[in-house]
Image: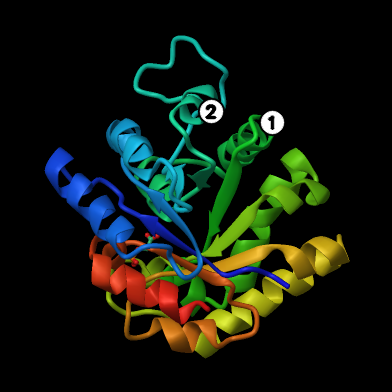
Amino acid sequence: MRKPLVAGNWKMHGSRASVTALVEGLLDLGATPCQTLICPSFVFLDQVQRQLAGSDIALGAQNLDWHDKGAYTGEVSAEMLVEFGCSHVLVGHSERRSLFAETDVQVGLKVEKCLSSGLTPVICIGESLAERQADETFTVVQRQLDAVIRQVGVTALRHGIIAYEPVWAIGTGESATPEQAETVHVHIRQYLAKQDENISQNIQLLYGGSVNGENAADLFAQENIDGALVGGASLKVDDFLRICRAAV
Ligand code: PGA
């Protein structure tokens, strides 16, 4: 049985005060109903790690560098993230790919670094609107997955999570329909099954892109959607909690 996971991607939002209040809000509600992960900006990891002590909410980062250490100005290593209490890292988010020119090969290297450091990569894949309109959705997600599998091998994905996030649905308020998302999730599972049946059945496949308290239950009702990667709605305690409740 795959466990549902709801992950919040806080992106470049927050201040000391607002982050403190947001985490307090989540903690006030007691145990979250499903496996929950929050990914604040790097600069808030220390503060959130302290706040989360003793809670079952997991802490993640939004990115990492694949080198161990060295002259990589502005980058953050896996070892640093582990020291600051992270168990997960978002890798290959579409904003990293499109705004910061992150390549499929780099995404593979980052996944490899996560795995060798004991961090769980949340591997983000998904097509742009133009790619969807050109009927290339499956080709794009396969290409993105292949780059990772080439680097780490398919069985290594037993320690990973995949988030399918169609680029056209991210931050637009226009989520994929449950059927659209499920179709791609089924395809991803079938594609993985050709290489490793066990991985295909057990890997958590999250959907991301304008998930909110309203649409989460319908998305999670789909057999192959195991949770969500949530941006905007993860910054609001009530909305995020509603999504967590819908996941169980
Ligand atoms: P959104 O972002 O929920 O605001 O669409 C999702 C994401 O970028 O992971």
Q: Quadrant of residue 235?
A: bottom left
Q: Position of residue 36 (x, y in %)?
A: 47, 59
Q: Position of residue 207 (x, y in %)?
A: 50, 70
Q: Residue furthest top?
A: 71
Q: Are marks 1 and 2 in contact (CB under 8 Å)?
A: yes
Type of amino acid under label 2: Ala
Please tell me which residue lies in front, 32 or 6.
32
* Crowd rating for badge 2 (residues with CA inside 10 Å; few <14, some 14–19, many 20+): many
Residue 210 appears in the figure: no
Q: Position of residue 189 (x, y in %)?
A: 73, 71
Please tell me which residue lies in front, 183 or 49.
49
Please tell me which residue lies in front, 227 or 146.
227
Q: Secondary structure at mark 1?
A: helix
Type of amino acid under label 1: Ser
Is 85 placed above or below 201 here?
above
Q: Position of residue 109 (x, y in %)?
A: 63, 34
Q: CA distance from mark 1 to mark 2?
A: 9 Å
Residue 33 appears in the figure: yes
Q: Which mark is residue 116?
A: 1
Which residue is at 70% across, 48% downward?
Answer: 159
Q: Decide if residue 235 is on the left or right side of residue 134.
A: left
Which residue is at 56% across, 27% downward?
Answer: 66
Which residue is at 58% across, 76% downward?
Answer: 225
Q: Secondary structure at mark 2?
A: helix
* Crowd rating for badge 1 (residues with CA inside 10 Å; few <14, some 14–19, many 20+): few
Q: Quadrant of residue 190?
A: bottom right
Which residue is at 16% across, 39% downward?
Answer: 16
Is 247 placed above or below 54 here?
below
Is 34 placed above or below 184 here?
above
- Residue at which label 2 appears: 78
